[in-house]
């Protein structure tokens, strides 16, 4: 058994992660790192198939369609006859009302099925009264791994960006068992922060005042410049100026691009000459003008 990112991994878990990475080594490696982090949080030094499925479920990986739903049902030991009985339900189409009418007919002899339809109609009625800006669809083929969610599941997608789900969740009855607490069910929703950021960025929905909160970025050529900049940043912040120090030893071009992307109006460039003269090269990102400014005059120049 090999060690990856400080944990061991079962063969079944490896196969599960590989299958969800679409055969792409880069994606597989990234997923493995995230799953390993999840196992570490659980104080588990080994990634089992169960932990892999739980972690990937939390990461919103693997939204599977009808064919894969049937395949997973078969792998879970569901008989072909039972899977066949499910097909009319999985194939139901139309709008939400039409789907429920068809389900009511299909599940005529099922007391539990009729109760589920009634509860779904109640939820749809409540949501209709809320006048949601988003559209709501009842999808009977949506699935996220049958050993994680045990009831209704929820998926939220952005309407104007093809990026997959940005939020999801549902009912789970067995999750707490992983933590040693049996018999406690729950309903939860998680948000994909990275995807939500990408959607907002793509649609240009970030407010200008928020993006411009930082007024000056310190961009240093090397570690010595970063050390020089730290006390200056601290001093400027105490005077009410929102200041940042670029967190990595990156090329100046990349640091300038960062400031431009965040609409930071000023950049203080720090090199050997600036350190020697106790100053910074202050660049106005709007006009492109730059000049040597002493440490004591930085705030004054920004407020002009």
Image (cartoon, rainbow, N blue to C red):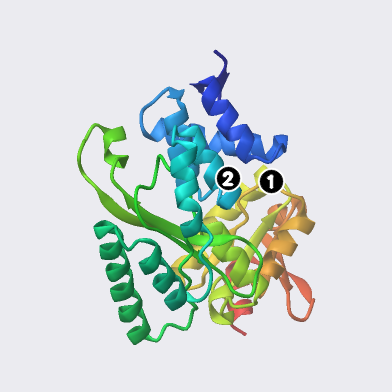
Residue 194 image offset from top left, x and y in percent = 56, 58
Residue 276 seen anywhere in this rendered image of the structure: yes
Q: Residue at x 64, y 60 (%)?
A: 218
Q: Residue at x 49, y 63 (%)?
A: 235
In front of the other: 37 or 242: 37
Please tell me whether residue 21 is drawn above or below residue 89 in the rendered image.
above
Number of other residues with Cα within 10 Å of mark 2, as a class: few under 14, some 14 to 19, many 20 or more: few
Q: Which mark is residue 49?
A: none
Please tell me whether residue 112 is drawn above or below residue 204 in the rendered image.
above
Number of other residues with Cα within 10 Å of mark 1, as a class: few under 14, some 14 to 19, many 20 or more: some
Pick whichever of labels 1 and 2 is earlier in the sequence: 2
- Of the 4 image quadrants, the one containing the N terminus is top right
- Of the 4 image quadrants, the one containing the C terminus is bottom right
Which element carries disc 1, helix, strand or loop? loop
Which element carries disc 2, helix, strand or loop? helix
Q: Which mark is residue 68?
A: 2
Q: Residue at x 31, y 33 (%)?
A: 178
Residue 61 image offset from top left, x and y in percent = 55, 47
In front of the other: 188 or 257: 188
Q: Are marks 1 and 2 in contact (CB under 8 Å)?
A: no
Please tell me whether residue 14 is drawn above or below residue 203 in the rendered image.
above
Q: How many marks?
A: 2
Residue 73 image offset from top left, x and y in percent = 48, 40
In front of the other: 240 or 210: 210
Q: Residue furthest top?
A: 1
Which residue position holds label 1? Answer: 249
Residue 286 image offset from top left, x and y in percent = 74, 80
């Amino acid at each position: 058994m090999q060690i990856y990112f400080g944990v061991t991994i079962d063969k079944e878990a490896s196969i599960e992660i590989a299958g969800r990475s679409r055969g792409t080594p880069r994606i597989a490696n990234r997923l493995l790192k995230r799953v390993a982090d999840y196992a570490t949080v659980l104080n588990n030094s080994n990634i089992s198939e169960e932990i892999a499925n739980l972690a990937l479920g939390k990461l919103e990986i693997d939204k599977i369609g009808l064919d894969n739903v049937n395949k997973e049902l078969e792998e879970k030991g569901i008989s072909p006859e039972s899977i066949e009985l499910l097909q009319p339900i999985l194939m139901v189409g139309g709008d939400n009302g039409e789907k429920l009418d068809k389900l009511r007919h299909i599940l005529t002899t099922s007391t539990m099925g009729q109760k589920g339809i009634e509860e779904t109609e109640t939820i749809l009625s409540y949501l209709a009264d809320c006048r949601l800006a988003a559209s709501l669809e009842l999808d009977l083929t949506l699935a996220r791994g049958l050993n994680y969610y045990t009831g209704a599941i929820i998926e939220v997608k952005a309407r104007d960006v093809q990026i997959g789900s940005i939020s999801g969740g549902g009912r789970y009855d067995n999750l707490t068992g992983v933590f040693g607490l049996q018999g406690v069910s729950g309903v939860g929703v998680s948000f994909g922060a990275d995807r939500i950021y990408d959607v907002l960025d793509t649609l240009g929905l970030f407010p200008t005042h928020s993006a411009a909160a930082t007024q000056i970025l310190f961009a240093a050529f090397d570690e010595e410049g970063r050390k020089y900049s730290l006390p200056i940043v601290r001093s400027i912040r105490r005077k009410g100026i929102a200041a940042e120090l670029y967190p990595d030893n990156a090329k100046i071009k990349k640091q300038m691009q960062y400031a431009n992307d965040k609409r930071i109006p000023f950049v203080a460039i720090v090199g050997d000459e600036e350190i020697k003269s106790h100053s910074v090269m202050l660049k106005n990102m709007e006009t492109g003008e730059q000049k040597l400014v002493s440490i004591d005059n930085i705030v004054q120049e920004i407020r002009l």
